[in-house]
Image (cartoon, rainbow, N blue to C red):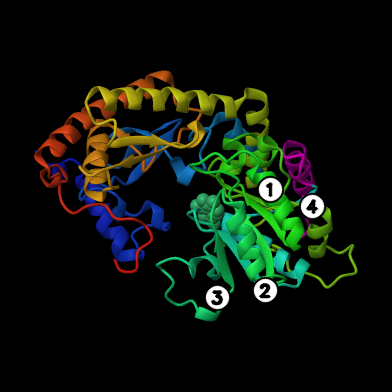
Amino acid sequence: MGPNHILPLSQEANERLHRLIPGGAHTYAKGSDQYPEELAPVIERGRGAHVWDIDGNEYIEYGAGLRSVSLGHAHPRVLEAVHTEIEKGANFVRPSIMEAEAAERFLATVPTAEMVKFAKNGSDATTAAVRLARAATGRPLVAICHDHAFFSTDDWFIGTTPMSAGIPGKTTDLTISFPYGDLEATDEVLRLHEGKVACLILEAATQQEPPPGYLAGLRQLADKHGCLLIFDEMITGFRWSEAGAQGMYGVTPDLSTFGKALGNGFAVSALAGKREFMELGGLRDDRERVFLLSTTHGAETHSLAAAMAVMDTYVEEGIADRLHALGDRLAAGVREAAAGIGVGDHVLVRGRASNLVFATLDEEFKPSQPYRTLFLRELITGGVIGPSFVVSSALTDEDIDKTIDVVAQACMVYRKALDSGDPTQWMGGRPVKPVFRKYA
Ligand SMILES: Cc1ncc(COP(=O)(O)O)c(C=O)c1O
């Protein structure tokens, strides 16, 4: 029986999704193009670290909700907070007291920030940070770290990707870039555009830990050149530590942005930062006002309740440590299995334990989408789904061990494909594709 017979209902639903929704999903990163042909399950429900597709298959899930669901699905503490709040109404004519309580809780959890404003999407928060930096400095250019994958769905960032259609070149010209980990090169970029760069925006860390002294050096560079330092903590926020990467590495940015894990799947993001800048968006400042994050749904009460429950859970239950322990167990097991089967230099696990990704290399040790297709196919048919090995705290040691077993099976097939010099017969169809590409 071929894989196309395994998921008939998902197959049918994928057809429907593509007929109705451009891209077949409301988020490109969930697209069927990133899954092996005829093996793109459509999800029916989730609980903890497990999901079930509409064909009735159960999977251990990684990278849930684009890394937002870090406590697992239907987390009891988060759900209880949401239920309680939703009974009282979701959105009023004036701020609810929840807005103050959630802001207090956030600033107690991320004590390096002095003010915070909530929204629904991370992209809105990073765009607001950029606008604020431009207004505060009176400068036009935004410098993004070009080693980081994503900052916003807005033009100032999407214009720099291969999917820049519809974005005027003039807009994209205002975004320049600098490399991660290289202070000298960044200094040079700032000198080249002296007096024109409003901000440096980057993730404090992603796949790479910051080199010693790097973040402090960046802080000094920003000060020397008079631009703002912005940490995009969409991924690092909570996964590195509940105080963010800024709390962990001890370097305070001018502004920072949070989302994803903050809501455990509920829609809530945050722009946080120094009062002197944040007040530009307020009513207690004489300077020209900045339109800073003002959305109809920004303070939806049950999402703020979810965020408060998430913050409490992280702090009281030591979630960041648990994520690291689970990730360490998984990374060690996968590395051992891959090495034992002779693919240790081809199936790689990288990144911080709380945010693991995998790389699939071909016979010449180059990143390979055909081998990724083979690997994903074996994972999915083995009952493990995810574009990464990004853990949630709901995983059990048994889940991790089962995942390692499935990876070991996948590695055996991988070895066979390497030996034959061609993975095609194990791909089940066309290769998976990256999200950002110019043509479908
Ligand atoms: C580092 C980073 N910044 C910003 C965003 C944008 O967040 P959102 O999808 O909530 O708009 C993402 C989302 O993938 C991200 O990974």
- Which disc number belongs to residue 217? 1
x and y percent of residue 252 in the render? Answer: 73, 45
Residue 290 is a magenta residue? no
User: On screen, 25 above or below 331?
Assistant: below
Residue 97 is a magenta residue? yes
* Image depth: mark 3 or mark 4 in front: 3
Q: CA distance from mark 1 to mark 2?
A: 23 Å
- Residue at label 3? 173
Side of 419 where 197 appears, left or right: right
Report the residue at 77% width, 37% height from top. 108
User: How would you rate the neighbour count of disc 4 (Cα within 10 Å): few for under 14, some for 14-19, many for 20 or more?
Assistant: some
Secondary structure of the residue carrying tag 1 is helix
Q: Which residue is more in the foreground, 221 or 89? A: 221
Mark 1: which amino acid? Answer: Gly
* Image depth: mark 4 or mark 1 in front: 1
- Magenta segment range? 89-113
Sequence-earlier tag: 3 or 4: 3
Secondary structure of the residue carrying tag 3 is loop
- Which disc number belongs to residue 140? 2
User: On screen, 136 above or below 339?
Assistant: below
Quadrant where the N terminus is found in the figure: top left
- Which disc number belongs to residue 274? 4
